[in-house]
């Protein structure tokens, strides 16, 4: 029972990091219908930016986190302005292919700036162990769960209450109608990419604090696809639930079955979901009649 509880905490903390990366994916998809294949590399940049602030600049962790969020938002705005905005109005496949190229560029840039050697830095999440009954779990993984849920809840409120959030939902429903109502589509796209980069950076900071900083962090971004397909491409709540399910599925499979199955079980689930419910658990089903 103790091992099961420890696995559950570990799976949920990892799942919430997946959810943060997946929410950035969802935000961009909701605003522009673009599938962003560079989301994992934005996660990677988050880990290196916090390392840059805390270790290389020697900032306190509070200022390091703030600098990371500002630089991540600036990176998202830069990408949208220089790479994506010129393609507005072009076929969606063109924008998707650009995000694939952007993934390689961001990974190469991180390698050029910080090298391929794994790095560590003082954790800004509480370290040590917490005893729950007779089970002992890491404090960093335990606190990552409510912290991620608070951030995800704030993002959900942003979509429901803020002007930009409502504008994103309007654009997702009908771009022409939103444009006729005076909504600036380029501005909303810029906000969406800034938000996607910030949420990925937060996930990257948590991941880097727990497992360290290395190029392998970008591989975590591949887990975004099973998460968003399971939860729904346009659902923030679905991203949270999908992240939890994938995170738990990985740790349970790795502990109780082994043989490397935990590395492929998310993609097995991805195939099954696409065959049975291609819009995900909470995705909006779109039926086109001709």
Image (cartoon, grey):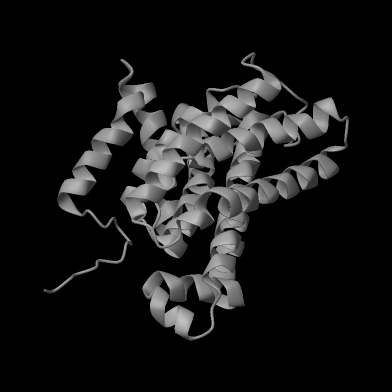
The image quarter containing residue 226 is: top left
Q: Residue 33 placed where, x, y %?
A: 38, 59
Q: Residue 214 placed where, x, y %?
A: 60, 22
Question: Is residue 149 among what the camera can see?
Answer: no
Identity of the residue drawn at 37% across and 75% down: 174
The image quarter containing residue 58 is: top right
Q: Outermost residue toward the bottom? A: 181
Q: Outermost residue toward the left? A: 290
**The N terminus is located in which quarter?**
top left
Side of 94 relative to 63 (left or right)? left
Side of 128 relative to 190 (left or right)? right
Side of 165 relative to 223 (left or right)? right
Identity of the residue drawn at 65% across and 21% down: 112
Q: Residue 75 placed where, x, y %?
A: 65, 46
Side of 118 relative to 56 (left or right)? left
Question: Is residue 251 among what the camera can see?
Answer: yes
Q: In the rendered image of this protein, does residue 255 appear above or below residue 23?
A: above
Please tell me which residue lies in front, 2 or 9. Answer: 9
Identity of the residue drawn at 62% across and 55% down: 194
Please tell me which residue lies in front, 74 or 95. Answer: 95
What is the count of numbered marks?
0
Q: Residue 202 placed where, x, y %?
A: 64, 44
Q: In the rendered image of this protein, does residue 130 appear above or below residue 76?
A: above
């Amino acid at each position: 029972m103790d091992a099961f509880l420890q696995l559950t905490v570990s799976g949920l903390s990892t799942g919430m990091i997946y959810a943060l990366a997946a929410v950035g994916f969802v935000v961009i998809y909701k605003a522009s219908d673009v599938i962003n294949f560079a989301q994992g590399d934005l996660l990677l940049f988050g880990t290196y930016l916090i390392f840059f602030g805390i270790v290389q600049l020697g900032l306190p962790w509070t200022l390091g986190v703030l600098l990371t969020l500002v630089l991540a938002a600036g990176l998202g705005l830069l990408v949208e302005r220089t790479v994506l905005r010129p393609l507005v109005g072009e076929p969606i496949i063109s924008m998707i292919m650009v995000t694939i190229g952007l993934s390689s560029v961001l990974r190469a840039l991180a390698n050029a700036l910080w090298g391929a050697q794994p790095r560590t830095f003082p954790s800004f999440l509480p370290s040590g162990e917490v005893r729950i009954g007779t089970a002992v779990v890491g404090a960093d993984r335990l606190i990552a769960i409510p912290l991620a849920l608070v951030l995800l809840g704030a993002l959900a409120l942003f979509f429901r209450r803020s002007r930009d959030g409502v504008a994103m939902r309007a654009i997702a429903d009908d771009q022409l109608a939103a444009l006729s109502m005076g909504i600036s589509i380029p501005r909303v796209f810029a906000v969406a990419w800034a938000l996607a980069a910030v949420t990925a950076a937060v996930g990257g900071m948590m991941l880097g604090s727990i497992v360290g900083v290395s190029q392998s962090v970008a591989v975590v971004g591949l887990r975004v696809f099973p998460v968003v397909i399971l939860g729904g491409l346009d659902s923030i709540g679905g991203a949270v639930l999908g992240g939890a399910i994938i995170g738990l599925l990985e740790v349970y499979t790795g502990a109780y079955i082994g043989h490397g199955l935990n590395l492929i079980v998310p993609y097995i689930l991805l195939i099954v979901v696409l065959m049975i419910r291609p819009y995900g658990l909470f995705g909006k089903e779109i039926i086109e009649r001709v």
